[in-house]
Image: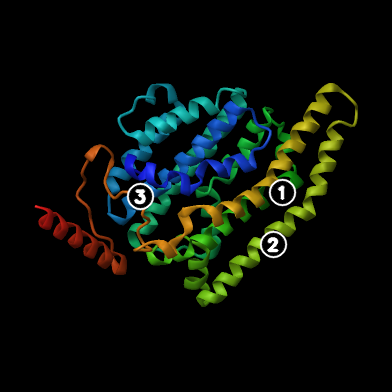
């Protein structure tokens, strides 16, 4: 997103409002750090889309290589020439300071997996491969960053939870229900623009491609899964409360503190549902009916940062035809301006 586009669209995209709704109670500095990471994630996701559409493999894989090194050594990347790398390093440095090394190592490992999964998506899109439903569900849980956002619940509570709490079945089920809800609802709201852009990663698209569903049937199935996540959370929520109560049963100060942290994480899991729902109906990111081209969001730029160039390879199939038309249109405009 170039500066002029950011100024024009940032308020309407509502990126920072999203985080403010589902990490309640976090200190301002931590909330600001999480919000910045969330904004960065959206911009990075758009870069992924544009690099894929324009066949910029060299650019993309150079970026993710730098992101991996910035993840483990953020301080040395704060002034990186690539804005996405510098911004990511800044976020990581701030996010990994409040809690201990154990939490930091876990967060770094989880985010490294997100980067790997985005590379996998890039390769899929380059050849137009639509993953099966089961494959897509596993991949989506990685690209959406389920584990990262669950880690950040602890950061918002300013308390690293012990493993026996984090890996407890009830806690895991509640956390995954919130994240699956968010991922599937995002897929539901993104389906129009992703169909228009020949995207291959969307639950609805996998259902259409591999289970033979019509568009209407696929939308109904995604909605069913979204509703099922809410049902699952409401069913398991009481068991997480019981888990928290058990932590404080002996009446120790540490146990009471742990109970408060678990309940804070649980409350913010619940907040994910309403915040994600609200965001998708308020953000300009999903208002495709107002776009002149549903396959090209008006808030993104097709240019590499800093005016860098990479010879673009046209994608295959219908997306490639649209790519050629847009490229020809841009060239004609340049000729007319000249």
Expressed as whole percent of the image width and height from the top left, the position of residue 279 reads 56, 51
* Image point (49%, 25%), residue name: 93
Upstream in sequence: badge 3 or badge 1: 1
* Image point (62%, 24%), residue name: 99
Q: Nearer the viewer, residue 59 or 163?
A: 59
Q: Residues within 10 Å of mark 3 (few under 14, many from 20)?
A: some
Q: Which residue is mark 2?
A: 228
In three-dimensional space, the C-alpha distance between marks 2 and 1, rounded to whole angstroms, equals 12 Å
Q: Which residue is mark 3?
A: 300
Q: Which residue is mark 1?
A: 174
Q: Nearer the viewer, residue 298 or 54?
A: 298
Query: Circles 3 and 1: CB distance less than 8 Å?
Result: no
Expressed as whole percent of the image width and height from the top left, the position of residue 88 reads 43, 33
Q: Secondary structure at mark 3?
A: loop
The residue lying furthest to the right in this view is: 250
Quarter holding residue 313: bottom left
Q: Residues within 10 Å of mark 1 (few under 14, many from 20)?
A: many
* Image point (55%, 57%), residue name: 281
């Amino acid at each position: 997103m170039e500066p002029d586009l950011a100024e024009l669209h940032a308020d309407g995209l509502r990126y920072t409002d999203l985080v403010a709704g589902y990490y309640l109670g976090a200190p301002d500095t931590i909330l600001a750090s999480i919000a910045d990471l969330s904004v960065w994630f959206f911009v990075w996701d758009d870069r992924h889309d544009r690099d894929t559409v324009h066949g910029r493999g060299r650019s993309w894989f150079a970026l993710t290589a730098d992101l991996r090194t910035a993840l483990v050594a953020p301080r040395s990347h704060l002034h990186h020439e690539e804005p996405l790398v510098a911004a990511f390093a800044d976020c990581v440095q701030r996010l990994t300071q409040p809690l201990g090394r154990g939490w930091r190592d876990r967060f770094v490992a989880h985010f490294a997996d997100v980067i790997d999964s985005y590379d996998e998506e890039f390769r899929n899109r380059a050849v137009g491969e639509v993953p099966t439903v089961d494959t897509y569900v596993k991949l989506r849980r990685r690209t959406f960053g389920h584990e990262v956002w669950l880690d950040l619940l602890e950061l918002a509570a300013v308390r690293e939870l012990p493993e026996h709490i984090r890996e407890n079945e009830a806690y895991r089920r509640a956390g995954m229900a919130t994240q699956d809800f968010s991922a599937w609802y995002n897929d539901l709201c993104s389906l129009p623009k992703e169909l228009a852009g020949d995207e291959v990663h969307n639950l609805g698209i996998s259902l259409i491609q591999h289970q033979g569903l019509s568009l209407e049937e696929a939308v109904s199935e995604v909605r069913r899964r979204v509703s099922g996540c809410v049902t699952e959370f409401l069913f398991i929520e009481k068991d997480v409360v019981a888990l928290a109560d058990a932590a404080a049963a002996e009446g120790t100060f540490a146990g009471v503190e742990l109970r408060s942290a678990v309940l804070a994480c649980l409350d913010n899991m619940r907040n994910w549902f309403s915040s994600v729902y609200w965001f998708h109906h308020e953000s300009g990111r999903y208002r495709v009916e107002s776009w002149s081209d549903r396959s090209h969001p008006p808030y993104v730029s097709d240019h590499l940062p800093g005016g860098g160039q990479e010879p673009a390879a046209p994608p295959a199939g219908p997306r490639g035809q649209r790519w050629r038309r847009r490229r020809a249109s841009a060239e004609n405009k340049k000729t007319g301006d000249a």
